[in-house]
Image (tube, grey):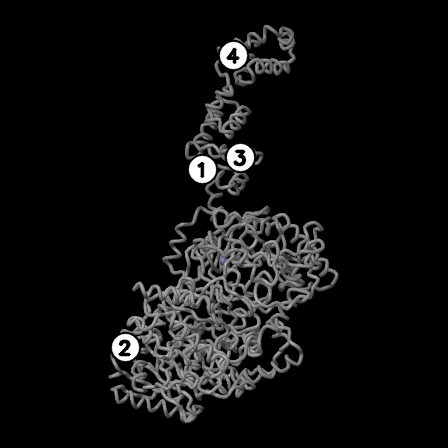
Amino acid sequence: MTWEPVIGIEVHVELLTSSKMFCGCRVSFGDPPNTNVCPTCLGLPGSLPVPNRRAIEWLVKIGLALNCRINEWSVFHRKNYFYADLPKNYQISQYDHPVCVDGWLDVSGPDGAFRVGIERAHMEEDTGKSIHLGEGGRIHSATQTLLDFNRAGVPLVEIVSKPDIGTPPRARAFAQELREVILTLGVSDARLEEGSMRFDANVSLRRPGGPLGTKVEVKNMNSFRSLERALGYEIDRQRKLLEAGREVVQETRHWDEEAGVTQGMRTKEVSSDYRYFPDPDLVPIVVDTAWRERIAAELPELPAQRRARYLDQGVDPQTASVLSASEPDLRNLYDQAVEAGADPRTTALWVTGEITAALRRDEQLRLPAGGELAELLTLIEQGTVSASAAKEVLAGMLAGEGGAREVAERRNLIQISDSDALSEVVDTVLAENPDAVERYRAGEGKVLGFLVGQVMRATGGRADPRLVNRLLAERLG
Amino acid sequence: MSTPTIAEANRLFEEGLLDPVELLSEVLHRASLTEAELHAYLTIDHEGARRRAEAAAERLARGERRGPLDGIPIALKDNLCTKGVETTCASQILAGWVPPYDATAVARLQEAGAVLVGKTNLDEFAMGSSTENSAYGPTRNPWDTERVPGGSSGGSAAAVAVGSAVAALGSDTGGSIRQPAALCGVVGFKPTYGLVSRYGLVAFASSLDQIGPITRTVADAGMLFEVIAGHDPLDATSYPGQVPRWDAELDAGVGGVRIGLVRELSGDGIDPEVAEVCRRVLDLLSDQGAQVVEVSLPTVEVALSAYYLVAPAECSANLARFDGIRYGLRVPGDTVSETMGRTRAEGFGPEVTRRILLGTYALSAGYYDAFYLQAQRVRALVVQDFAEAYQKADVLVSPTSPTTAFPLGAKVADPLAMYMSDVCTIPSNLAGHPAISLPVGLDSAGLPIGLQIMAPALGETLLFRVAAEVERVAGFDARPRLAEGMP
Amino acid sequence: MSAFMPIDIDIVHVARLARIDLHPDELESYRAQLGVILEHAAKVQAYDTSGVEPISHPLGFTNAFREDEPAPSLPRDEVLSAAPEARDGYFVAPPTMETE
Ligand SMILES: [Zn+2]
């Protein structure tokens, strides 16, 4: 009998607002410790929280993008637990009346398209950061904790999927799609390695059609790859336990990237009792129809819509996915070039291929305007520059040398397509290589390639190869 | 000369018979004579007060006074944050803590030119009804120093009663302004919830806490209220609308006003002498044309139960931040968790510990619905009750406290008996309504009796109108022993 | 409402949740006091509140927000000077042993 994995994903996204969730301190990463703090985000006696309107609007935006119902009436709760980097020893969060509920996200995975249900998306505040000093930087052997509260109070959106993801590759595809949505909305920089987007997973196994098994929470996955690996490992671990007739213990396990295993906490798990209750320092949030519609009207084109549009424009599915996941600058370049008349399919290939590769080599490069890219593609299409020369033209354009034709001319990359001019060169080459001409006529067909090469060499590679072939054929025929 | 009221001081300032520096000297002199016996203050800011009084004196001399509070020495309950001046909430856990910011109410007093004298004693974190729960020793009642001044704003009430401050701010969560005002023979006013910003008031129970004035007269209370009230963008629960004018109908009398005596707060459990004096005042109001009726608030008793669930629940979270990590006391342990546990065990007194435990229990899994949620629903019933009563009466009255000042130590061992001291005042906190206490007479032991007037939310205009008339007809002008014999 | 009465208060658990390290004799004394108070408080359960919405703000308004505009933070020296222990711009605390 087989076991079927049941995976649910919990995502935390730090919003990139100008100020924190409940106070005016800046949201800024990498500043010296404890420089963006005030009475409110330090939890000083007497301080009070006042919610950031933009953060709420961005949460609604996320909810709408995830096809959620936006609750007209929602409230903040206090989630009570003691932790050194939680200044008030309670976190302002949402409990039974979150802003967004019951949505879904369509994902195209490695094994086809699937839909993931979204349980809820709610607003909360981030904690500070602890640095555990001691041997090996491990919590268990730390001798001191250093606390920095710059991150405390940064707006945090928690998105909880329904437990209906069946495999680790699908979990990864969902996570990637969600990140793309967040980036498209422009509400977070969503960097996994810096923790501005964090994934936790709940995993359990069950018999197909059977009741849900005991679930384990897996934390500390800092990349899509580690999310997939951690889930793979954990499913395997649980399967082995079950097959050996043992039980899965409900617990939180940390993914150890280096060892490639999940590990349970060594200390005894304290059963959590968060004593949620409505925060009396805050009044209810009411998102009425007018407000919701105003926010909906500001929604940008979402990744799924974008991919559908690319397909409609004739881009192949693979390239459409890559283009859709590209940086906004690159997507804009595509849109502008197409608008300037370039062929969408070719444009997409160039943007996701040559241009992306060049940018990866050198971040300082300046993207061409859409019209300039369109011009380059026209030059290729008309045979004015060869496909290989075009890469050189592009390099010049990225280096800021000018427009496509300008660079091609300055770098002497315009193809010689003038048959009179080329005829002269062909005649010279034939005259200089009587042997080769003899062998060709004797039936050694491959010698033609040599002669073409000689013509190309004589023209510095600028000759139109099709024309060269024709002229040689005429004279040798 | 004895310490004047705000109104009197303004007249003396204008007539050139007094200046703010002289007035401050008078007040500080009064403090030096009384503090040893009274212990109303935890901190007196001699230097800051002197500086502000001098600045006020200059403004007076230049004819540039900022308003009626300019140059008036005012005391602050020590749970109001004062930038640069130690703020302890009468707790060991905050010993030595100097806030880096001012509470909004404090900042507004400063802008109005008030001279902040110092920080007054209270029950630790405002939890108590006698000011005996202060980690720094109790305040005593100026009418009889063997008795309590009430609480938790006992220091503020005692200071105003003896004139070691012209006026003071307190905070009222279940009666903490009105009950000590009653027991000390002064005026105490709790505004409608949301009219005075709570920013910088160290929270006890956020949905009930409200800052308000303690003064010698109704008009003084109004003047203080006018300065500290008004929307504050730093407090999300602060009312964004217009603040009612306290003096809009001050001289209108009580002709035609329907005054409802709360039946449940005038019989059983109320000291007969207290009930009698209150009834006599109603007769006098009746003589002035008021229509006195009896009304019922059936939920009064259960309101006390609801209060003793809601307030501790909120306090259990509000006081979680005192953990020895970022400020205040630290009692070190081997781990963060141990450090927090030890700091809190040593830093909090018994009453605070009791309420934190009570609130933690009321919120914990399995009990939330039966206790906290049910208490919040009962609170809604109290609001409904009031609404029905206000169909029959325009304002409601009751004694402020069931008894006059009780002896020190009398109720320390019996928390429930102590909690009963707040039975008359708690309903207004639960409903968020305004209420004022003013002295209307003395009992046979010579202790003051306070009458409470309650009004619907935002009903301050009518409340002050009736209070002014009560003040006039009651003609209370007695002063405590410790305020007599001024030089 | 059902006639729910608190029979047993797990005071050790409650004190742990509240993060107050009390001695066993103190715990016992608080347990007894809480029992008396809760017996009185349990009167709230005798009231029929079906259909009653719990109160949120007495004046009933909603949507109190601030605009997303940065305001000055506190000077770090001032912030850390109040701390029981601080070093190199950080608050310093004993080691963290458990995660919750
Ligand atoms: Zn802040």
Q: Which mark is residue A335?
A: 1
Q: What is the secondary structure assignment of the residue under circle 3? A: loop
Q: Earlier in the sequence, mark 3 or mark 4?
A: 3
Q: Hey, what amino acid is under mark 3?
A: Gln
Q: Quadrant of residue B62?
A: bottom left
Which circle's residue, 1 or 4, is located before the other in the chain?
Answer: 1
Location of the N terminus of chain A (image quadrant): bottom right
Q: Amino acid at mark 1?
A: Asp
Instruction: Give the residue at the far right of this rendering.
Output: A244
Residues at marks 1 and 4, CA–CA distance in whole angstroms: 38 Å
Of residue A302 and residue B276, the one placed in the foreground of this image is B276
User: Which residue is painted at 53% across and 36% down in the image?
Assistant: A352
* Distance Cα–Cα, label 3 vs label 4: 40 Å
Asked if residue B249 shows in the view, the reply is: yes
* Cβ of mark 3 under 8 A from ligand 1: no
Q: Which residue is mark 4?
A: A422
Type of the residue with mark 4: Leu
The residue carrying mark 3 is A364
List x then y, in percent, for residue A285. Answer: 43, 63
Chain identity of mark 3: A
From the top left corner, tell me how far across and down residue A367 is, in percent.
Answer: 49, 34
Q: CA distance from mark 4 to mark 2?
A: 108 Å
Q: Which residue is mark 2?
A: B250
**Disc 2 secondary structure class:** loop
Q: State the separation of the CA atoms marked 3 and 2.
A: 74 Å
Q: Are marks 1 and 2 in contact (CB under 8 Å)?
A: no
